[in-house]
Amino acid sequence: MAFCLTEKQKQARAILNGPAKFILLYGGSRSGKTFVEVRNIIIRTMGEAKSRHGIFRQTRKDLKESIWLDTYPKVLDLCAAGINPKNNESELYSVFNNKSEIWFGFLDDKKHSDNVLGKEYNTIFFNEVSEISYKMFSKALTRLALKNGLRNKVYCDCNPPGTWHWAYKLFIEKINPETDEPLANPEDYAVLNMNPIDNLANLPEDYIKTLEGLPEEERNRFLLGIWQEGVSGGIYTKEIALAEQEGRICEVAHNPEFPVYPIFDIGIGDETSIIFAQFAGQRINLIDFYEASNEGSDHYVSVMRQREKDCGYKYANIFFPHDGRNREWITGTNRRQAIESKGFRVSVLPASPVEDGINAVKMLFGQIWFDKARCKGLLEALRNYHYEQDPIKLIRSKTPAHDWSSHASDALRYTAMAYNSKIARPLPKEQAPLNPAAAIKFSDLLVRNKRRRYAE
Ligand SMILES: Nc1ncnc2c1ncn2[C@@H]1O[C@H](COP(=O)(O)OP(=O)(O)OP(=O)(O)O)[C@@H](O)[C@H]1O
Ligand SMILES: [Mg+2]
């Protein structure tokens, strides 16, 4: 069958080749977004010798299944028949006859992403940009630095996650997601909405009907490509909306009468998240949040010590997830020992199914207060924490999507476990007053905690 672009893809092509440097194609599933972007990258690759282009996605599995083994060979076959670039299967790159390269990168693996981001590119395509953190997006952009006859470009696509997402701020509202300031060069950013109805020629006959049968929020996202207030499949969407309505996302000051519990989710190769919590009677005050990747224990120790100095935090136990007993972030020693050797006391939480942790968070959510400014990153992650929707099989995953938002969200699961543990809640719940001022003092807590040892 002769190949042709859909009318919508022709509009997309004009934007991809137009004056804007950053382009986002957003919309429903199976709309032909990724196809037209990959096609454009192949044309740029063939048009400029020794050029280099990157196609990045968050996870290896998604990159391999949907791009490397699916869209890329399909586009080559349909639009560049006879051009047979040499593929390197283990490192995931393709070399063309003119010595141009396309590198396929998954960003949630440190070794692989370091390798991919150690190069310079003419084009970077962030496939399903909703899964990628703004931090990683910004880091990757520093690699858009190859100088030759091409104008360097950034392509992005996604099924719109929600109006709170950084991609909405950047591309639709044209504000800097970190500072909320208007962009200096808004004309550099362009978007196009593409939906499955625009790609009927290339879809199974009953596909639109299937999408019409989805629940409303998923229909909005995958059929109509609408940016919604929440995320479809959002795990804490209702709880966060309620927290907002009830004014629990506000300024939450550190209360020096109470200890601070740093609660870790530990990642190797990806984010380590720390929630700084105070348990004031029935109130769970999340006063601070920190996230970093590829750092060793010394880094996190200095983050905690700095806050001790600057903000007056007095630490009680640090909580680690059950894998906190395992090897240290960088050096390979025991993480718990590494932190304890710096004068901290570590409690390791028992292993527990993710679903149980999510239920525990939901049960406690009405008691949680968030410091709006210091927990901005945590709130963004919680808003994004969701069950995955397979756009082809149209089923939801049983476990939450593993992306940039899952580490901070895991840290909240551990916060709920820590709160429910005996060590962090020295008084039985019914005795614990709601008014923080009347609740147990830090000094009392230390005395009590001395007598307790948390069962690991
Ligand atoms: N011009 C075309 N000719 C032939 N097939 C096409 C064309 N455009 C898209 N397709 C096919 O349509 C299907 C959907 O395209 P694509 O994967 O690009 O959609 P998408 O918008 O990226 O979807 P999703 O949001 O689910 O990632 C794929 O099977 C793709 O190969
Ligand atoms: Mg796609």
Image (tube, rainbow, N blue to C red):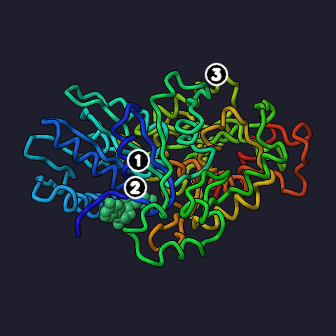
Res 2 quadrant in image: bottom left
Residue drawn at x 19%, y 49% is 93
Question: What residue is pinned by disc 2?
Answer: 7
Q: Secondary structure at mark 2?
A: helix
Residue drawn at x 33%, y 38% is 17
The kind of residue on which mark 2 rests is Glu
Q: Residue 99 has which mark?
A: none
Front of the two marks 2 and 3:
2
Looking at the rendered image, the quarter that the N terminus falls into is bottom left
Residue drawn at x 58%, y 64% is 354
Question: What residue is pinned by disc 1?
Answer: 11
Looking at the rendered image, the quarter that the C terminus falls into is bottom right
Nearest to N terminus: mark 2 or mark 3: 2
Nearer the observer, 8 or 61: 8
Give coordinates of residue 279: x percent, y percent. 77, 45
The vertical placement of 148 against 213, above or below, is above
Give coordinates of residue 143: x percent, y percent. 31, 31
**Residue 259 located left or right of residue 19:** right
* Count of picture labels: 3
Nearest to N terminus: mark 1 or mark 3: 1
**Label 1 C-beta lies within 8 Å of the nearest ligand 1 atom:** no
The kind of residue on which mark 1 rests is Gln
Question: What residue is pinned by disc 3?
Answer: 309
Q: Residues within 10 Å of mark 1 (few under 14, many from 20)?
A: few
**Residue 84 located left or right of residue 125:** left
Give coordinates of residue 314: x percent, y percent. 69, 31
Q: Secondary structure at mark 3?
A: helix
